[in-house]
Amino acid sequence: MTAPIQPESSRDATSDVTAWFSTRIGGVLVPLAATVLAFLIGGLVVLITGHNPVTAYRAIFEGTGLNWFFPWVGGESREAAANDLQQTLILMTPLVLTGIAVAFAFRCGLFNIGGQGQYWVGFIAALYVGTHLDGFSRPVHLLVAILASIVAGSIWGGIAGILKATVGAHEVITTIMLNWIAIFGGMYLFEIGGPLQGPQPSIPRSAEIPDSVELWPIWGSLPSLHAGIFIALFALVVYYVLLNRTTLGYEVRAVGFNPEAARYGGISVAKNYFLALAISGAFAGLAGSVDVLGFKFAVSTGDFATNFIPFTGIAVALLGRNKPVGILFAALLFAALEVGTSTRQLDPEVFEPALAVDLATMIQALVIFFVGADLLILYLWRARRFVGLGRRVQPEPRP
Amino acid sequence: MPDTPLLELRGITKRFPGVLANDHVDLELVKGEVHALLGENGAGKSTLMNILYGLYHPDEGEIRLNGKPVRIGSPRDAIDLGIGMVHQHFMLIPVMTVAENIVLAVEPTSGPFLDLHAAEKRVQELSTQFGLAVRPDARVASISVGMQQRAEILKALYRGAEILILDEPTAVLTPQEAKELFAIIRSLQAEGKSIIFITHKLNEVLDIADRITVLRQGKQVDTVPREGATPEGLARLMVGRDVVLRVEKPEAQPGDVLLDVDNLEVRDERDLEAVRGVSFDVKAGEIVGIAGVDGNGQTELIDALTGLRRPSGGRISVGGKDVTTAGARESLDLGVGHIPEDRQVRGLVLDFTLAENLALHDFRKKPDSRWGCLFPKRIVQRAVRLLKEFDVRGGGPQTRAASLSGGNQQKVVVAREVSRDPRVLIAAQPTRGLDVGAIEFVHRRLVTERDEGRAILLVSFELEEILSLSDRILVLYEGRIVGEYPPGVSEEELGIAMTGGRRQAA
Ligand SMILES: Nc1ncnc2c1ncn2[C@@H]1O[C@H](COP(=O)(O)OP(=O)(O)OP(=O)(O)O)[C@@H](O)[C@H]1O
Ligand SMILES: [Mg+2]
């Protein structure tokens, strides 16, 4: 001990390469394999329904607008691609934010299913500020609306947090209950005769926010991609910094990994449960405000029950492995899948749109399933004689 | 002893990212033999055994059973080949009974139904055959660690193990339980079973093993018969230098009282009284040892002293300040260090890096952080220094704690607690799972800390450790302190007090 003989000799080149490989690539491998596998199985189903999977996937891909990035696509199809890509990115924006919301809670060992409720309270708060307050300049008005959504979302998440921290009520149950409260509360506000119903007396719909609180359009027109995407990208940075560069993030992660050790380290587990859910709610609330301020501008009572963005956020966090870059790509994937298979984009000759929507849902589900079953994937990987690459397979029981 | 080996490992090599854990290791096991595997922390013992049990796959080398090469792809294969393993962390399901756990995955059935009666009967037979007394119908959660270990051994036997691997089985046992385990091992041996036994305790090796294989830095150094082996010789083989097996320490110079405990009462999880009116103090510059059989209130006492559990009565003060109701955080801030009993449950966040683990107490303060902002570079810098100072092997600051060997994990915990310069250091089983060299280092370090004026409370089930380190010894029995002894007291006398003998005499 006093004469440390660092086992230099036992460090050899091969193991250094595998070390690099497993830390850099290992975390990417599984989600990537999960996605590929999901698309392969999806293709099989396409085949069974009597279509050509290659042309179907190609049509879906072109519907996402991602072909805009190919320099050889020009002329009219380039314009069409630009339009499609705008839709994909518009949808990606709230997905990134709800993905972060779920991921942040995950890192504290909590499962926040309340994204939906938090999204809606954020949405409504921003809408209210947008429609009922005035006399601000555009940046200030926007800022107030966004802050309102963050506060509303964090209160909604924070309620579940307080319940968890004080009486130990399970967050899955409480956040689901809060979802319904938000949904029915929202319906009540905007229904015919409701306190916040808009100017048309016979339509259960809110007023539209004035142009002066819209997020700046940055690309295209139908509807245009708005500045909310920068908010989402910035949120990714905030997420990373918060988690890895602050004492708060350290505490959240410690509690998420091992609450008993965290307690021993002088960290209050209850406080972090509360904070994690409140912060998680803030991100989801922000997703609501970028949607309303960016391209929805108003809400009808019918929208409340049909919005699945916050749920897709769960898939985004899972596939993205709670990592900022992972979340970004996962959100892009799910948004593209949604847009590429939407009725408007797909040529019915190639693949019936009704089937396409189901295909999208199925692929989504498969991706989540395979990400959850990462042991299975690693097993398949190993079976392909890639022994030694990737992460540890069996957690060694440590003395 | 017949000459044809039952089991041969030939040239086993295993690489982990950045570490060569096993480097062309050879090992032979003959039928009916108890073979001890010795080596420093991180020498590759657990890895080698996990390979034999099918949990890891060797990069090179072969395994032969009865002369025939075999492939062990999974624990299932190992079990089918008659190889059983008892991990140091038991793999029992707490809510199930001993019998249910034992038959898990190989349940006897009558028709489509689980025949639990037959299972219990078979378990009972095995347990009488090998002298493994354990109640088949008891829930695992409610039995002692020693009993759980027996359940694990029974589980292996039930599945037809002819070769039994025990990875540091005595690290979690009290000396009495260890003696009982040895009796069991001898009866297994008498029935023709072969046993591979990992331990860091040299006297155990000399007590039970027929042959001893020593690993150092992943390589097999030597295999020697017990005859002629000495603790010093084995230690030298393991560490590559002479090890001082006794602690040499100057006379203590006790100063002011730093930890004062007055009539402390603490309840356990089930709300039963676990500590019943304990009073003692620890002065600056002395080591007070608390001896006792596991389960006599040690855990609850330690938890109360470190702010992890609120006492139900009495008073605790640190450096004159009342901390009876202080939480863990305040207790840390007041300079109470705590080497916890179980490094995996509490001492480490296994998914954190070593640097993050080393910052577990100080991340809120300068220089680790300021105004809530963490400075990872500084945290890593300090980690580099500590890992070197405490000779933690098998990884750097960015290595995940989970991938370290058991003993090296323990060193990380010790490094963190000692380096904070605590005024009061509560050390519970500080050398659990450490190799002789590391024990020597930690013991010396504790004495140095003492001489720098810290108050050290040592809680250990190892009488030897208590006797060699303590300046005063307190015996805890059924939640009360039943006696105070000078360091010169005999093991026998302590042993009697620890089992309640003294109280009857009084
Ligand atoms: N799963 C793993 N991933 C990466 N490295 C590992 C893993 N398991 C073990 N190692 C490394 O391999 C080496 C040997 O570890 P092993 O657990 O076999 O040691 P050991 O001899 O059992 O030590 P101890 O006495 O401390 O339990 C160590 O350097 C350890 O850090
Ligand atoms: Mg080990």
Image (cartoon, coloured by chain):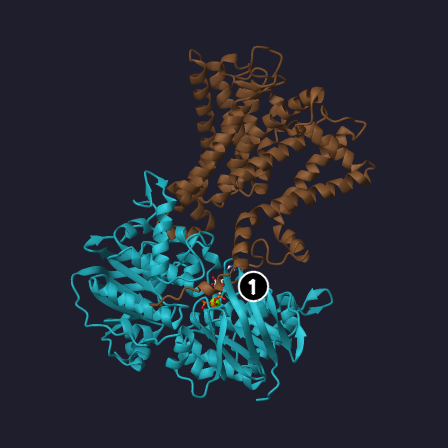
Chain colours: A brown, B cyan
Q: Position of residue B152 (x, y in %)?
A: 54, 70
Q: For residue B121, which quarter of the picture?
A: bottom right
In the picture, the quarter occupied by the C terminus of chain B is bottom left
Which residue sits at x=68%, y=43%?
Answer: A36
Say above or below: B223 vs A192. Answer: below
Res. A207 in view: yes
Q: Is residue B155 above or below residue A93?
A: below
- Relative placement, left or right, of B371 versus A52 is left
Q: Residues within 10 Å of mark 1 (few under 14, many from 20)?
A: some
- Tell me the amino acid under the disc marked 1: Met
Where in the figure is residue A205, as x and y percent of width and height? Answer: 59, 17
Using the image as rendered, state which of residue A266 and residue A64 is in the foreground: A64
Judge by depth and name the residue closer to the eye, B294 or B399.
B399
Residue placed under numbered mark 1 in the picture:
B96
Q: Is residue A73 left or right of residue A146?
A: right
Q: Which residue appears farthest toward the right when viewing the image? A: A50
Query: Foreground residue, B52 or B430?
Result: B52
Q: Write the residue at 50% across / 71% down.
A: B219
Q: Position of residue A301 (x, y in %)?
A: 60, 21
- Residue A3 x, y percent position in the rendering: 35, 68
Q: Secondary structure at mark 1?
A: loop
Quadrant of the rendered image containing residue B235:
bottom left
Quadrant including the N terminus of chain B: bottom right
Q: In the picture shown, does residue A102 fall above or below B168?
A: above
Q: Is residue B499 above or below residue A374?
A: below
Pinpoint the chain carrying mark 1: B
